[in-house]
Structure formats: C-alpha cells, structure tokens
Amino acid sequence: MGILHTNAFSPLDFWIPATIVTIVIKTALTTLLCFFCLAIFSAVHADTPLELSMKKMGKAYKQLALDLKQPQDASKADYLALTATLKTEAQTARGLVPKKVANLYPESRDAMVKDYQKSIDDLGVSIDALSQAIQNSKWDEANKQLVALKQKMIDGHKAFRKKE
Ligand code: HEM
C-alpha cells in the first residue's frame, strides 16, 4: 500500500525564502562596505583647520558681495557681522600654515610662512577699511574695498594654495 505525501515541501518552497535571505545579507554587507569606504574617504579628505577658516571666509565674502550690490542702511549691522567673521577667520588663518608649506626645506618654509603671514596681514587691513566704509555708509568705497579683497584672495591663492 503506497503512502501519498501530498503535503510534502517541494524544493521550491525552501528556495524562495533562501534566496530572499541571501539577497538581504548581500545588500546589508554591500551597504556596510559603502559606509566603510565613505568613512575612510572622509578621514583622508577631512578639511584642515585652514581650509575650515577659508571656507567660513568664503561664505561671508559671498554673502557680503551679494548684499553690497544693493546696500541698505537698515542692514548695516548684518554687513558688519559678516566683516567681523572675515576678520576673525583671517586672524585664525594667520596662526595656521598652508599645506603647500609642508614639503619645503626649512629655509624656504620659513620664508614662505613669513610671506603668507604678511599677505594675511594685508588682507586684515582691507577688511578693516571695508568695515569702516560700511560703518560710514560709504557704499561705493565699500564695493571698492570688496574688489581689493577679492584681488588679495586671488593673489593669495596663486602664491600659497597647493595645486591638488
Ligand atoms: C577674502 C579673502 C579670501 C577668501 C574668501 C578665501 C577663501 C578660500 C576658500 C573658499 C578656500 C578653499 C577651502 C577648501 O578647499 O576647503 C581657500 C583656500 C585657501 N586659501 Fe583662501 N581665501 C581668501 C584669502 C586668502 C589669502 C589672502 C590667502 C593667503 C595669504 C589665502 C590662502 C589660502 C590657502 C593657502 C588655501 C588652501 C588651504 C591650505 O593649503 O591649507 N586665502 N580660501
């Protein structure tokens, strides 16, 4: 007498959940690997303190350049807050050294650091003149100082920024 196994599992019943489990595990592992690579990449490319200061300067400068296209007396305090950021970050930057300096021989390194500090000091003079002009609502003068500031940025980057 034969027994009929009508309720027996077919191999297909195991195959489907097993495939789903494999897909889930593979996806999880791939995601983990991506996060790991991202963490390594971020660590290698982390901003230096000078880059962070420069970024803050860049943001303040952009906002100010935009604002001073149509200056409003009522917004003077906002503009002065932006020049204050420029000044603070320039002071911070003065105490730091550009990446470009790292691989130089000591004599050239010292000379470049001195030049760099002098350029940052010049930048400070322009920032002071800019805030003075804003304080006195001399908008043409303020825009002139902004142009001078931009030129110092271009020159400073040409001389001291490493080509990556
Ligand atoms: C208002 C003027 C300036 C602004 C808005 C400005 C802005 C910036 C910005 C946005 C960066 C890129 C940061 C990054 O890649 O994360 C940068 C980098 C840099 N800037 Fe300026 N900058 C100014 C003036 C100057 C001056 C006058 C000097 C030099 C005397 C200078 C030296 C550098 C250097 C060396 C770097 C590369 C960072 C490093 O090598 O460690 N910057 N700057």
Image (cartoon, rainbow, N blue to C red):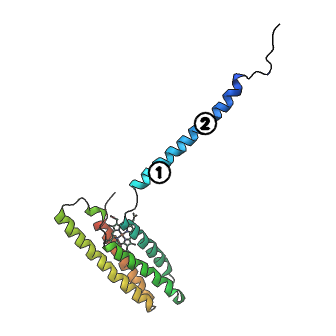
In the picture as drawn, the residue positioned furthest to the top comes out as 1
- Residue type pointed to by label 1: Leu
Q: Quadrant of the N terminus?
A: top right
Residue shown at the point (44%, 90%) measured from the top left: 135
Residue shown at the point (81%, 14%) measured from the top left: 4
Residue shown at the point (26%, 76%) measured from the top left: 118
**Residue 67 placement, left or right of 151:** right
Residue behind mark 2 = 23
**Residue 76 placement, left or right of 48:** right
- Give the mark nearer the N terminus: 2 vs 1: 2
- Residue type pointed to by label 2: Ile
Q: Nearer the viewer, residue 9 or 111?
A: 9
In the picture as drawn, the residue positioned furthest to the bottom comes out as 136
Q: Is residue 105 above or below residue 15?
A: below
Please state the horizontal and vertical placement of residue 50, each as a whole percent of the image: 36, 67
Please state the horizontal and vertical placement of residue 123, each as a whole percent of the image: 33, 78
Element marked by disc 2: helix
Residue behind mark 1 = 38
Residue 150 badge: none
Question: CA gap, disc 2 to disc 1?
Answer: 22 Å
Please state the horizontal and vertical placement of residue 121, each as a whole percent of the image: 29, 79
Task: Answer with the quarter of the image where residue 20 lies.
Answer: top right
Please state the horizontal and vertical placement of residue 2, each as a whole percent of the image: 81, 9
Q: Mark 1 CB in 8 Å range of ligand 1?
A: no
Task: Answer with the quarter of the image where residue 91 lies.
Answer: bottom left
**Residue 75 placement, left or right of 142:** right
